[in-house]
C-alpha cells in the first residue's frame, strides 16, 4: 500500500493577524462550519477511486485556525478515514491550535479522537509585540495553554516563533525559547517575518509606524537564535525548522522530499502522480461545488521531467542534510555530472558543498538559498 500525506485546510479565524496572507475568513456561522466539514468528507468520497491504493501516514489540519471548529466535527472526518481503512497505523496527525479560548475539554477531545501532534501558534510571548502584530492572545494565555497541553498528555508539541517583528530584538527570541523549554517542546519553527502586500503589516511598515530589523540585524538574529536552539537540544533539519531527535515534522518532510499528498478544503493544494493542483479559494463556492458534485479544482499543472528535477533539488536543499546524489541519479536516471558546471560555481562561491555523497547548502548558502535555487534551474 502506497503512503500519502493529507492536508486539511480549515479557513476559519476569529480575527486576522496583521502579517497573514493565507486564505481565511473571520465571519462565519456554526451552520457554515458544519456544512464545510461535511464538504470535506464528501471531497474525500469524491476522491475514493484515486485513494484506493493509498493510506495516509501523515495528516495535517491547518488553517486558518482549526481550533475555532468544534472537535466533534473533526471526529466525523477521522472516523470516515478510519472506517474506510485510509489511515496507517501510527500515522502522525497534526492539528494547528491557537492559545485563545480552548481548554482541557477541547484538548482531551482532540487527543481522544486521534490527534497526536499539536502545532501551537505562539509567535512571541511579548505582549507589546503581540498587540502590534494583531494576535488575539497574550503571554499569560499562551503559557496557560501550553501548561494545559502538558497536563492533557500531548508528547509531540511544536510551536511557531517569528523574528524580525516590530519592536523586537534578539533578546526577545532568546526569552521566547527559554519559555518554550519549560513546556517540553519537541519542535520549534522559526520564521523571519515576510511582509506581504495585501496585509495590515504592509501598511504598518509603509507608514513607518514601527521599524523592522535591517538586513544585517535580521541575519545576526537568525544566526544567534539558531545557535541558541542547538545549544538547547533543537537540531536544525530544515532552513526554518528545529526539533529534538526523532521529532521532525513527518508531514512537512513530505513536501521537502517531494512526496505525494492530497489537500482537501478551500484553497488546499495537492501533488499526486506528478500533477499539482489547487482548490477554489472561497468557502461558499467550495461548499456549493462539492454539494453539486462539481470539481473544486481551479488550477492544475503537470510537472514535466525538467521541472521535476529542479523541484527535487530546491526542495531537497531546504533540508540541512541536503540531497543524496545517488538517490537523485536513480530517481531521474541521469548522471549528476550534468550539473558539474552550475554546482561547481556555487561550491566555489561557498554556497554549496558535497560531503559523504550529499549535496547541501552551506551556512552562507542558507542565507542566499533563493539565489542558489535560481542558479540551479
Image: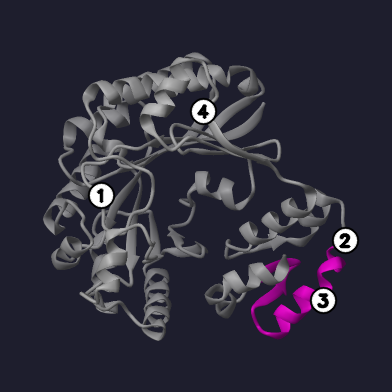
The reply to whether the C-beta atoms of the residues labelled 2 and 4 are less than 8 Å apart is no
Residue 72 x, y percent position in the rendering: 28, 22
| Disc 1 to disc 2, C-alpha distance | 48 Å
Badge number at residue 296? 4
Residue at point 75%, 81% (across, down): 345
Taking 19 as reference, is 7 above or below it? above
Which residue, given by chain and number where applicable, does mark 1 sit on? 16
Residue drawn at the location 73% of the way across and 51% of the way down: 308
Kindly indicate whether the residue at mark 2 contacts the one at mark 1 (C-beta within 8 angstroms): no
Distance (Cα) linking label 2 and label 4 = 40 Å
Separation of residues labelled 1 and 3 (CA atoms): 46 Å
Of residues 201 and 264, which is closer to you in this image? 201
Query: Reading the chain from its start, which is encountered first: label 2 or label 4?
Result: 4
Q: Secondary structure at mark 3?
A: helix
Q: Is the C-beta separation of discs 2 and 3 under 8 Å?
A: no
Picture quadrant of residue 116: top left
Amino acid at each position: 500500500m502506497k503512503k500519502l500525506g493529507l492536508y486539511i485546510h480549515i479557513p476559519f479565524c476569529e480575527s486576522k493577524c496583521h502579517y497573514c496572507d493565507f486564505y481565511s475568513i473571520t465571519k462565519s456561522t456554526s451552520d457554515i462550519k458544519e456544512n464545510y466539514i461535511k464538504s470535506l468528507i464528501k471531497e474525500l468520497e469524491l476522491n475514493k477511486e484515486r485513494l484506493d491504493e493509498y493510506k495516509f501516514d501523515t495528516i495535517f489540519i491547518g488553517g486558518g485556525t482549526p481550533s475555532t471548529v468544534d472537535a466533534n466535527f473533526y471526529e466525523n472526518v477521522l472516523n470516515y478515514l478510519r472506517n474506510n481503512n485510509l489511515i496507517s497505523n501510527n500515522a502522525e496527525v497534526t492539528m494547528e491550535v491557537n492559545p485563545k479560548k480552548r481548554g482541557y475539554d477541547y484538548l482531551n477531545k482532540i487527543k481522544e479522537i486521534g490527534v497526536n501532534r499539536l502545532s501551537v501558534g505562539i509567535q512571541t510571548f511579548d505582549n507589546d509585540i503581540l498587540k502590534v502584530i494583531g494576535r488575539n492572545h497574550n503571554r499569560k494565555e499562551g503559557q496557560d495553554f501550553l501548561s494545559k497541553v502538558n497536563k492533557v498528555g500531548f508528547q509531540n508539541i511544536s510551536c511557531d516563533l517569528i523574528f524580525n517583528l516590530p519592536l523586537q530584538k534578539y533578546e526577545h527570541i532568546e526569552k521566547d525559547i527559554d519559555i518554550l523549554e519549560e513546556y517540553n517542546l519537541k519542535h520549534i519553527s522559526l520564521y523571519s517575518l515576510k511582509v506581504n502586500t495585501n496585509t495590515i503589516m504592509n501598511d504598518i511598515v509603509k507608514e513607518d509606524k514601527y521599524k523592522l530589523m535591517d538586513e544585517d540585524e535580521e541575519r545576526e538574529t537568525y544566526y544567534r537564535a539558531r545557535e541558541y536552539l542547538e545549544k538547547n537540544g533543537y537540531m536544525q533539519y530544515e532552513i526554518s525548522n528545529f526539533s529534538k531527535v526523532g521529532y521532525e515534522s513527518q508531514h512537512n518532510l513530505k513536501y521537502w522530499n517531494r512526496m505525494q499528498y492530497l489537500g482537501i478544503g478551500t484553497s488546499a493544494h495537492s501533488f499526486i502522480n506528478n500533477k499539482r493542483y489547487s482548490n477554489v479559494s472561497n468557502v461558499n463556492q467550495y461548499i456549493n461545488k462539492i454539494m453539486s458534485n462539481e470539481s473544486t479544482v481551479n488550477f492544475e499543472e503537470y510537472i514535466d521531467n525538467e521541472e521535476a528535477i529542479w523541484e527535487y533539488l530546491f526542495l531537497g536543499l531546504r533540508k540541512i542534510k541536503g540531497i543524496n546524489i545517488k538517490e537523485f541519479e536513480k530517481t531521474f536516471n541521469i548522471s549528476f555530472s550534468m550539473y558539474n558546471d552550475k554546482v561547481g560555481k556555487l561550491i566555489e562561491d561557498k554556497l554549496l558543498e558535497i560531503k559523504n555523497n550529499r549535496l547541501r547548502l552551506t551556512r552562507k548558502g542558507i542565507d542566499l538559498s533563493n539565489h542558489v535555487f535560481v542558479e540551479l534551474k
